[in-house]
Amino acid sequence: MRLILLGPPGAGKGTQAERLCATHGLAHLSTGDLLRAAVKAGTELGERAKGYMDKGELVPDELVLALLVERLRESSDAFLLDGFPRNVSQAEALAAELGSIQIERVVNLELGDEEIVERLLARGRKDDQEEVIRNRLEVFRAETAPLIDYYSAKGLLVSVDAEGSIDQITNRIEDALSNGAPSA
Ligand code: AMP
C-alpha cells in the first residue's frame, strides 16, 4: 500500500500515520520528522532548514527532496507519506520520482481552524506559538490545500473528518481505505 496523508497542521497526521504504518506494515516517511532530526543533528541541511521551520514557512523543495528521495527508494512498495507533498511542485517531483509506481490513496484529514489552533497550542512545540501557527495555517491554505483538488482530479482523494477521538479518526480512515473506489 502506498499512501499520502494530507491535512492542516494539528489534524493528527503524525499520530494517525504511526497507527496506519503499524497496522499495515508501511514505512512512515515524515518530512517534518526528517527535518527535525537534521536540525537536531546539526547537519548543514538542518542548519539551512531551521529558520524556515521556526517561522512556519515551507522549507525549500530541494532540501526536502534531498532528505526524502533516498528513503522513498528504500521503501517504494509500502509507505505512508506524512507531511509531504506540501505543494503542487513537490507532488510533481514525487510523481516523477515514482515513475510507474502509483500512489493508491490520498487521505485528506479535515479539521476546522478553531480546533487546529486549540490543538497546536496544547501541543506546545517550538513552532506552535500563536503567530507561527497562524502563519502555518496561511501557508497550508495557499500552498498545500491546492493538493486537495490536485489529487481529487486524479481520483485518489478520500476525505475524513478529523474531529473526535484518536480511535474514532483511525476507524474513519480504515473505513475509507477499505471502501472500494475513493470519492472526491
Ligand atoms: P510537520 O511536522 O509536517 O508539521 O513539519 C514541520 C515543519 O517542517 C513545517 O512547518 C515546515 O517548515 C517543514 N516541513 C515539513 N515537511 C515539509 C515539506 N514537505 N516541504 C516543506 N517544508 C516542510
Image (tube, helix red, strand yellow):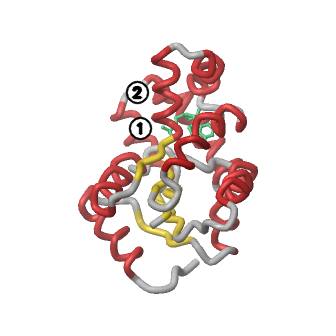
- The answer to whether the residues at label 1 and label 2 have Cβ atoms under 8 Å apart is yes
Q: Quadrant of the N terminus?
A: bottom left
Closest to the observer: 173 or 178? 178
The residue positioned 43% from the left and 45% from the top of the image is: 10
Q: What x and y, as percent, mark residue 67? A: 59, 35
Query: Residue tagged by mark 2?
Result: 125
The residue under label 1 is which amino acid type?
Leu
The residue positioned 67% from the left and 31% from the top of the image is: 63
Q: Quadrant of ligand 1?
A: top right
Closest to the observer: 7 or 106? 106
Q: What x and y, as percent, mark residue 145? A: 64, 56
Q: Which mark identifies residue 34?
A: none
Nearer mark to the viewer, of 1 and 2: 2
The residue positioned 34% from the left and 35% from the top of the image is: 122
Mark 1 → mark 2, Cα distance in angstroms? 8 Å
Q: Secondary structure at mark 1?
A: helix
Report whether 29 appears left or right of 92: left
The residue positioned 56% from the left and 71% from the top of the image is: 157
| Residue 115 visible in image | no
Q: What x and y, as percent, mark residue 176? A: 40, 75
Query: Residue tagged by mark 1?
Result: 120
Report whether 89 appears left or right of 111: right
